[in-house]
């Protein structure tokens, strides 16, 4: 697993795992295209550092993310580095740091080794910072239970722009689930992104770790967890 910053000696292990990420092929079937490796470590007074490594299997946009989540469960800041690895394509790289200060987000962005650019975005009280990540789909889901807005960064390297989208989620049921040859008692949620009109079904364990997700209405898998450990 690759890191923006190495794990410090004072950090306490909480959990780790890897997601298999799937796209939809021409026949509507799930096709493995990337892995998302992640770790969670506790720091300070119940805060957490979350490290995420998005690794495409056949070239594409690589992404390293580092998140600080407070003891209240709120993402207060995150750092992202993206770079393109694709044969025949020009090398592209971008980095961004995002920090929340009250009702605004402060962004420092750098694209293709250019000058640093500082941006400021106004936020409502119900807006959460949310890097795009399968692991952080839990934050997406649990905040969506009260119809929240999420502050994203757009996909790709050259389009590193802030987006604010409205999320809605609903608890459906508890059910048994087998993922990665392990059995879980999971909570199932329905989730909708109102900006994109994408709908998902997400299963989470008692630690609010997503175990599996499917795109609706086709029920096509988009992610499943393996190599999972929790203290």
Image (tube, rainbow, N blue to C red):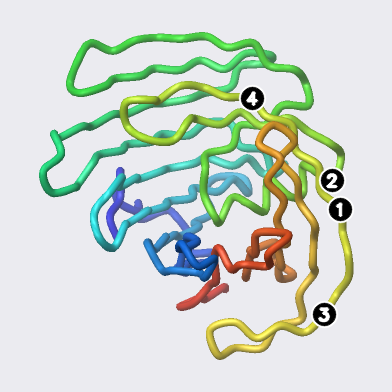
Are there few (<14), some (14-19), or many (20+) residues within 10 Å of tag 4? some
Label 4 or label 1, whichever comes before in sequence order? 4
Label 1 or label 2, whichever comes before in sequence order? 2
The residue pinned by badge 3 equals: 175
> Marks 1 and 2: CB-CB under 8 Å?
yes
> Marks 3 and 4: CB-CB under 8 Å?
no
Label 3 or label 1, whichever comes before in sequence order? 1
What residue sits 67% from the left and 29% below the top? 165
The residue pinned by badge 4 equals: 164
Q: Quadrant of the C terminus?
A: bottom right
- Of residues 166 and 50, the one drawn nearer to the viewer in this rendering: 166
- Per the image, label 2 sits on a secondary structure element best described as loop
Q: CA distance from mark 1 to mark 2?
A: 6 Å
> Marks 3 and 1: CB-CB under 8 Å?
no
What residue sits 70% from the left and 61% below the top? 208
Are there few (<14), some (14-19), or many (20+) residues within 10 Å of tag 1? some
The residue pinned by badge 1 equals: 170
């Amino acid at each position: 697993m690759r890191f923006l910053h190495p794990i410090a000696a004072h950090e306490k292990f909480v959990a780790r795992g890897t997601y298999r990420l799937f796209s939809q092929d021409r026949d509507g079937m799930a096709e493995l295209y990337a892995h998302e490796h992640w770790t969670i470590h506790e720091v300070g007074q119940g805060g957490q550092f979350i490290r995420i490594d998005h690794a495409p299997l056949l070239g594409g946009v690589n992404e390293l993310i580092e998140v600080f989540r407070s003891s209240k469960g709120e993402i207060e800041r995150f750092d992202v580095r993206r770079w393109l690895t694709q044969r025949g394509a020009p090398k592209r790289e971008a980095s961004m740091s995002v920090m929340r200060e009250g009702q605004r987000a402060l962004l420092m962005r750098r694209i293709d080794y250019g000058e640093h650019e500082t941006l400021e975005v106004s936020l409502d009280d119900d807006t959460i910072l949310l890097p795009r990540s399968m692991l952080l789909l839990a934050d997406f889901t649990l905040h969506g239970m009260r119809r929240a807005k999420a502050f994203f960064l757009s996909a790709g390297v050259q389009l590193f722009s802030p987006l604010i989208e409205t999320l809605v989620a609903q608890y459906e049921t508890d059910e048994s689930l087998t993922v990665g040859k392990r059995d879980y008692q999971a909570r199932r949620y329905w989730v909708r992104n109102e900006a994109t009109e994408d709908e998902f079904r997400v299963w989470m364990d008692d630690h609010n770790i997503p175990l599996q997700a499917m795109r609706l209405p086709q029920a096509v898998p988009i992610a499943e967890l393996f190599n999972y450990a929790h203290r």
